[in-house]
Amino acid sequence: MTDQIWYEDFIPGAALTSALRRITVADIDGYAALTGEHHPVHMDEDFARAAGFQGRIAHGLFSLALIEGLKSQLGVFERSVTASLGWTDIKFSAPLYPGEDVYLRLELVEKRMASKPGRGLATERGILLKADGTEVVSGDHLIFLLCRPEGEAQA
């Protein structure tokens, strides 16, 4: 089992990086089917080009959701994070096209103990980047983070 990052292991200033993930037309189509968001800039090549893009682009909220998916693939918060309390300061910086590779840079920003024992509040900054380093989307995410259970090995 992958080591977990518990409250005690959450070190502000540290950062984690995910593996690359290729974005596909099927990803965009699947997101549109799931959410019902079929704006033509995402679904129609000609419309997207006429709007000033190179072609169809991924939905902004799909890009934001990729932050959580890539974070999950890191495997280090699967048992230690118990809730998402919200996102702030979300910025959509660049379009994301099918065929592009992206990765997550997860920066550990700050933490403090919660009023309930055994857990804290932590802020992580998720930054979705293209393989060339271009930022696609970023935001700060407030989470409930459990303290290390008794007998659990340190990460």
Image (cartoon, rainbow, N blue to C red):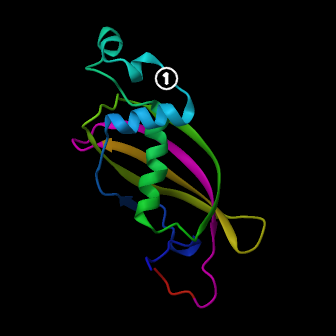
Q: Where is residue 73 in the image (x, y as percent from the top left)?
A: 41, 61
Please state, as top left, top right, bottom left or bottom right, where the C terminus lies in the image. Answer: bottom left
Span highlighted in magenta in the image: 130-151
- Is 100 situated left or right of 58 in this image? left
Q: Residue furthest left?
A: 132
**Image vertical order of residue 45 relative to residue 15, above or below:** above
**Image vertical order of residue 11 relative to residue 150, above or below:** above
User: How many labels, in total?
Assistant: 1
Q: Position of residue 13 (x, y in %)?
A: 43, 60
Instruction: Indicate the quadrant where residue 120 lies.
Output: bottom right
Q: Position of residue 7 (x, y in %)?
A: 58, 71
Identified at 31% across, 38% down, the residue is 24
Identified at 53% across, 26% down, the residue is 37
Check disc 1 and report its element: helix, strand or loop: loop
Is residue 54 on the magenta stretch? no
Q: Residue furthest top?
A: 50
- Is 148 situated left or right of 42 in this image? right
Which residue position is annotated with label 1? 38
Judging depth in this view, the residue of 79 and 47 nearest the camera is 47
